Amino acid sequence: MFLHTHPYEPFLFDGATRLIVGTLPPPRFTTGELKEGDVDFCYGSRDGYLWPILDEIFGLGLKFETSREAVRQRTEFLKSRQIGICDIVERAERERVDASDLGMRRVQLRDLVAHLYTYPSVHTLLFTGGGSRNGPEYFFRQLLKQYGLRLKRSNTQIPREHEFALPAKNPLSGIRVSSAERIIKTVSLTAPSGAANRAVGSMEAFKEVKRRNPSFTTLDFRIQQYRAYF
């Protein structure tokens, strides 16, 4: 049994307004056996699309290598855009050593709701995946249940958007944390992974653009989608 632990602490700071929320990086980030082209930071897998998408949107000129400079570029960008990262899974067990969300067992979640109380400027959570089992939205719904809270759907389009009211008084501790409740928005973005390409290809929204522009790719689809939220 492989104990898959998250290798990075949440990237949180005062003034952050949005949080990127995923699950876990590939197991090699836990063991430290990175591949050439990996970046030793959140979403640093050379096989992932998040940083290539943001690089394309903002023209960042990012380095894709295991270096301090590559990490510095990413942290400076995030702070400049007031974006934090707080993946929701702290650790999980796996029978197979792979990155499949469905392969996670006995999952231990990070208390993302507690972090929302600590960082009062956060108003939006950007889930890097939809509502499928063991995805970030799925686990966040479980966490909200512990607080007696629930998501309310706020649109009927893709990506899915929800919102919920974060009470001024923490429902678990009974302590008043702020003077008023906050409305927190969540967006379930199409996952920035190769595994999601088939799902993207089957989406009617993608097919419609593809019919008009045959050169349109699943990566182009994500760039178009992410641009609206970053």
Image (spheres, grey):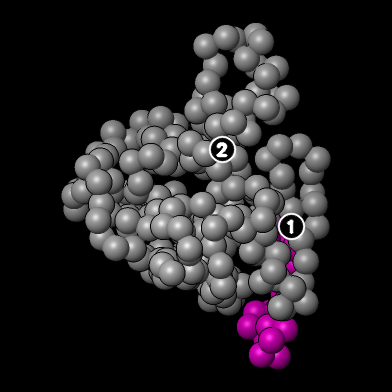
- Magenta residue span: 163-184
Q: Which residue is drawn at 48% across and 69% down?
A: 93
Q: Which residue is drawn at 52% across and 21% down?
A: 217
In this picture, is 90 found above or below 59? below
In this picture, is 53 found above or below 91? above
- Prevailing secondary structure of the magenta residues: loop
In this picture, is 196 found above or below 173? above
Residue 178 in magenta? yes
Mark 2 burial class by Cα count in 10 Å: few <14, some 14-19, many 20+? few
The three-letter amino acid code for the residue at tag 2 is Ala
Closer to the camera in the image, 97 or 26: 97
Closer to the camera in the image, 72 or 5: 5
Residue bearing mark 1: 163
In the drawing, does residue 11 fall left or right of residue 172? left
N-terminal of the pair, mark 1 or mark 2, is 1
Tell me the distance, in whole angstroms, between the alpha carbons under discs 1 and 2: 24 Å
Secondary structure beneath dot 2 equals helix
Q: Is residue 217 at all visible to an observer of this figure? A: yes
User: Mark 1 or mark 2: which is in front?
Assistant: 2
Q: Percent x, y for residue 228?
A: 59, 36
The numbered disc on residue 196 is: 2
Residue 91 in magenta? no
Query: What is the total number of numbered labels drawn onto the structure image?
Result: 2
- What is the residue that sits farthest to the bottom in this orientation? 174
In this picture, is 218 found above or below 43? above
Q: Percent x, y for residue 121?
A: 56, 65
The three-letter amino acid code for the residue at tag 1 is Glu
Q: Residue at x 45, y 58 (%)?
A: 96
Q: Residue at x 49, y 69 (%)?
A: 92
- For the N terminus, the quadrant is bottom left
Secondary structure beneath dot 1 equals strand
